[in-house]
Image (spheres, coloured by chain):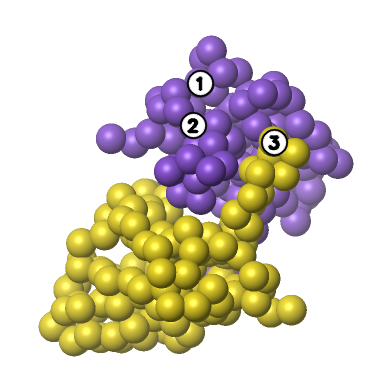
Chain colours: A purple, B yellow
Amino acid sequence: DQQVKQNSPSLSVQEGRISILNCDYTNSMFDYFLWYKKYPAEGPTFLISISSIKDKNEDGRFTVFLNKSAKHLSLHIVPSQPGDSAVYFCAASGEAGGTSYGKLTFGQGTILTVHP
Amino acid sequence: NAGVTQTPKFQVLKTGQSMTLQCAQDMNHEYMSWYRQDPGMGLRLIHYSVGAGITDQGEVPNGYNVSRSTTEDFPLRLLSAAPSQTSVYFCASSWGGWAGGLNTEAFFGQGTRLTVV
């Protein structure tokens, strides 16, 4: 049972445009959500996160939106750059101090390609 | 500050062999974990540890063993390798705290690509 789903295996956008990556989850106990970026032959690197007490978090060109009632989050990249081309994973975890803290449940990943 | 270091980077095993994947972090993180990445399945949690001497199973623990004798190290042991364990393995660590109500992200190593023939 896939508790975190990224239904789009790939996304292709033009440089300068917006990239929107989507993620759905089923477990209502998830309390914290993260996006990771991964280049080939490297480990995932943290991009941005959001707590369930918020509905939006921004960091430069990256914004994460959380819709708790729909159990949906999205990552917006504006403007997209060719260097953003990578695999993007969304992940979810439980509340710090709880038994699920530190345990990340990942989606399948979305391959983003940004064309010059 | 090296972050999370995994060794080896590549390994080929024969079915039935055992080996240990090494993971070390120098950030004094309490939480460490092991994931495997397979095509189309994202990363799946194998085992994790909330501190020295404390480990617990993740989503796919069968065939793997872990121990945590120090804060810095979290080795993953394959007891009797099987072709189904061919995968890329990632070790991660994160700070165990509650900083102003926000969680903190996990830092990942570069990965170990394991092939079992």
* Amino acid carrying mark 3 in the image: Gly
Q: Residue at x 58, y 37 (%)?
A: A33
- Badge 1 sits on which subunit? A
Tell me the distance, in whole angstroms, between the alpha carbons under discs 2 and 1. Answer: 10 Å
Q: In the current view of this chain or complex, which residue is farthest to the left?
A: B16
C-beta proximity under 8 Å, tags 1 and 3: no
- Badge 2 sits on which subunit? A
Q: In the rendered view of the protein, which quadrant contains the C terminus of chain B? A: bottom left
3 and 2 marks on the same chain? no
Mark 3 or 2, closer to the camera: 3
Q: Residue at x 43, y 78 (%)?
A: B69
**Residue A30: mark in rendering:** 2
* Amino acid carrying mark 1 in the image: Lys
* Amino acid carrying mark 2 in the image: Phe
Q: Position of residue A58 (x, y in %)?
A: 80, 34
Tell me the distance, in whole angstroms, between the alpha carbons under discs 1 and 3. Answer: 20 Å
A112 or B103: which is nearer to us? B103
- Badge 3 sits on which subunit? B
| Residue B37 in view here | no
Q: Is residue B45 above or below residue B52?
A: above
What residue is disc 1 on?
A71
Task: Name which quarter of the figure residue A57 lies in.
Answer: top right
Q: Is residue B99 above or below residue A78?
A: below
Q: Position of residue A105 (x, y in %)?
A: 44, 44
What residue is disc 3 on?
B101
Kind of element beneath mark 3: loop
Mark 2 or 1, closer to the camera: 2
Q: Residue at x 31, y 56 (%)?
A: B57
